[in-house]
Image: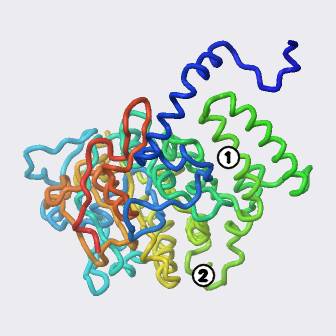
Amino acid sequence: MPHDRLNFPPFNRRSFLKRCGMGMGTLGLAALLKDAGLLTAHATSNVAPLSPRQPHFPGKAKRVVHFFLNGGPSHVDTFDPKPALEKYAGKPLPMETLKTERKTGAAFPSPFKFKKQGQSGLEISELFSNLGECADDLTIIRSMRANLPNHEPSLMLMNCGESVMSRPSVGSWVTYGLGSMNENLPGFVVLCPGGYPIKEAENWQSAFLPGVFQGTLIDSQHQSLDKLIENIRSDYASPGLQRKQLDLLQRMNEEHRQTRQEDPALEARMQSFELAYRMQMEAADAFDISREPRETQELYGSGIHGRQALIARRLLEKGVRYVQVWHGASQPWDDHENIAANHRKLAGQCDQPIAALIKDLKRRGMLDDTLVIVGGEFGRTPVGELVKGKEPSGRDHNPYGFSMVLAGGGVKGGHVHGATDEFGFKAVQDVVHVHDLHATILHLLGFDHEKFTYRYAGRDFRLTDVHGHVVRGVLS
């Protein structure tokens, strides 16, 4: 019989043998796995991948906003006061081991003053005076620990839980586990003004998770919607015509998908077409901060970073599950020299916006179920870095001890967890590795990090790999 008379799509010999030999066995296995509760919702239903889902247990947080201070802000100049550095200023520190990546010299006291803030008396640098007004809502972890003194692996560790191998980002894991609360917007949005940071899109990658869970990058230096989101509107077709075009394309892709046995790349492309269409109206509203009262706009400030923090709040309010707000992508906090001027400039750009978001979430009743995270990939040394022919004025990388700030979402307010040594070089009390931080974030969202896994290449992977403990001391 001629091929064009057959009423089924063509396939090759390998596909034919696979279907004949495996078909009934696969059906039987699927039934057994489903009865045992071992198949995920994605595998057993046609539910949209970003549909809201329940975690392992009721979590305190429903959404996350992460202010990533790229480049390694100095903890001893921001959230971890070390008066002992004044005593040894210009002298070698009395420490047996002080590993640094580059040549460093004598003790380098902070050029910034610290002040006790709020009823809790949290000590915070003058660099973050606005954030200091939120002291009673903050937990400061002063005993963070990473693995390496290099940006690339430390960015991957903080954002993806693994320094070397390609792994899904925290935001991808969160949206995989919880879905989104708005089908017309991505579940994971990345606001990064002025270009990519080091490691570029790997910082928000989905890796082996389905592509729909990857972060959607927005270049938030722009203000017009057409520049914020490329190709958000069509110059040639009305929304109605686009809908017809998309429906036709989806039918063709669906027929193609059925012959490809769950091709994840094809699935991701199909979902991206649909989401892009639905975003046209919703995104226009989410990114239009002119709809906010003047008082609210003034609270956040008029610069790029104030604008993107306000956009972040609007995205969270509209159901986006995870928003990462980058600061220092084009001019990092990587101050090997002139830290006094550079850190003051950088903090001046983001201090007001971060504090404004916390205050705004609180007055809207959203802070209790929104986890706010502030910090970079590592800290900096308490000794000055030696630069040939110059007086030491900056600090080298330091993964052995640094600070992270948390607020809302089930963490204590007005609380300090852990400590570095008296000079701020190494975490020595209640040490919190990055894996522990990730385990704690997942716990606050309602996940047991040891059971929250994804099967890939014959192994169950998790964000924390084979590490991590929930930091109970920061939980409210």
Q: Which residue is mark 2?
A: 296
- In the picture provided, is 5 more to the left or to the right than 404? right
Q: Using the rendered image of the protein, determine whether residue 303 is visible from the camera's viewpoint.
A: no
Write the residue at 72% across / 69% down. 285
| The quarter of the displayed image where residue 56 is located | bottom left
Residue 317 lies, with reference to residue 166, above or below; the image says below
**Color theme of the render:** rainbow
Q: Quadrant of the N terminus?
A: top right
Q: Amino acid at mark 1?
A: Gln
Q: Earlier in the sequence, mark 1 or mark 2?
A: 1
Q: Nearer the viewer, residue 118 or 312?
A: 312
Write the residue at 27% across / 80% down. 116
Give the alpha-carbon distance from disc 1 to disc 2, as whole Å.
35 Å
- In the picture provided, is 93 more to the left or to the right than 206? left
Q: Nearer the viewer, residue 158 or 342?
A: 158
Give the x, y percent position of residue 132.
37, 77
Q: Which residue is mark 1?
A: 271
Could you tell me which secondary element the residue under label 1 belongs to? helix
Q: Using the rendered image of the protein, determine whether residue 276 is visible from the camera's viewpoint.
A: yes
Could you tell me which secondary element the residue under label 2 belongs to? helix
Q: Quadrant of the C terminus?
A: bottom left
Dots 1 and 2: beta carbons under 8 Å?
A: no
Give the x, y percent position of residue 315.
60, 66
Give the x, y percent position of residue 346.
46, 61
Write the residue at 71% across / 75% down. 290
| The quarter of the displayed image where residue 193 is located | bottom right
Q: Amino acid at mark 2?
A: Thr
Circle nearer the viewer, 1 or 2? 1
